[in-house]
Image (spheres, helix red, strand yellow):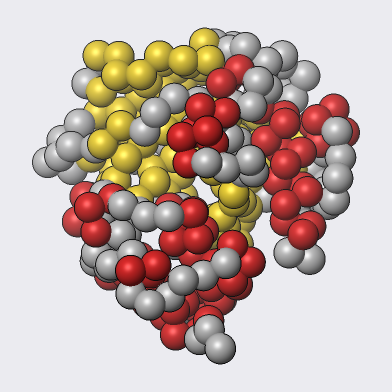
Amino acid sequence: MTDIPHIAEIVDTAAHDATEISQLSLSGYDLTPQQAYDVQAESIDRRMKRGETLIGVKMGMTSRAKMIQMGLDEMMWGRLTDKMLVEDGGEIDLKDYVHPRVEPEIAFLMKQDLSGKVSPLQAVEAVSAIAPAIEIIDSRYKDFKFNVPDVIADNTSSSSLVVGPWAKPDINIANLGMVMEFDGKAVEIGSSAAILGHPARALAGASRLVAEQGLSLKAGWIVMAGGATAAVALKPGVQVRLSVAQLGRVNFSVLP
């Protein structure tokens, strides 16, 4: 029988202490995706017992290219807590991470609960605001190597998020230009259309996938739609800024 609490302790300790661990699949823990989600839930319960609060979810593998590359036909998701929030314009310290990388994203703020299979239009109707956002992902596995259950168990590489100014949800976000800069130089240029063709599809996917675990998206939660470009590794001292057409900018810096 798979020892879910023990595996959860392994991944939670790695995230808490910012230490590398071997792939679970190479350490005798060959998990199914459902077992991996059980590990994720257990590891987040450990965080909540330390005083953290759930504030939303993040979507992963929302790029068709990434799905094909990983041999997947489904997105994955992870949980967000209040301790993961970085203030817009704030600073982070790389010592708190293992393999930190950043992705440009779109964030949704929920105005009502949402659960189950819904259309993208129905999903957006449950949203009170939309914002430009940056996710700092951080796999805790050695050499940044993992399989799908490994990633899910590691809370889908959730680490930190920076959310910009909230805008009204009536903005058409189907194809917004997105430019991520390091020290004023563009490192990734993309479009919100890279997120499943429309970020609202990621939100609808979030509603469906969390329902499969007996959960729902809650009013007041943040839902991160997934990366619109490849993730870029962070460096000491870098200033990171994301500009999204019609939505504005969000930024943070890394301590030297």
Q: Residue 250: x percent and y percent?
A: 44, 27
Name which quarter of the figure residue 214 lies in: bottom right
Q: In the image, is 100 to the left or to the right of 221?
A: left
From this view, report whether residue 177 is shown above or below residue 203.
above
Q: In the image, is 50 to the left or to the right of 188?
A: right
Quarter of the image with the C terminus in it = top left
Q: Residue 46: x percent and y percent?
A: 50, 78
Tell me how many marks there are: 0
Residue lying at 61% horizontally and 17% vertically, measured from the top left: 193
Residue lying at 38% horizontally and 77% vertically, measured from the top left: 28
From this view, report whether residue 94 is shown above or below residue 225.
below
Residue lying at 22% horizontally and 21% vertically, measured from the top left: 183
Q: In the image, is 247 to the left or to the right of 122?
A: left
From this view, report whether residue 158 is shown above or below residue 60.
below
From this view, report whether residue 174 is shown above or below residue 55.
above
Name which quarter of the figure residue 9 lies in: bottom left
Q: Residue 233: x percent and y percent?
A: 26, 36
Quarter of the image with the N terminus in it = bottom right
Query: Is residue 47 visible in the rendered structure shown here?
Result: no
Foreground pick, 123 / 195: 195
Q: Residue 136: x percent and y percent?
A: 38, 43
Foreground pick, 22 / 15: 22
Question: Which residue reaches farthest left?
Answer: 256
Query: Is residue 102 visible in the rendered structure shown here?
Result: yes
Q: In the image, is 100 to the left or to the right of 79?
A: left
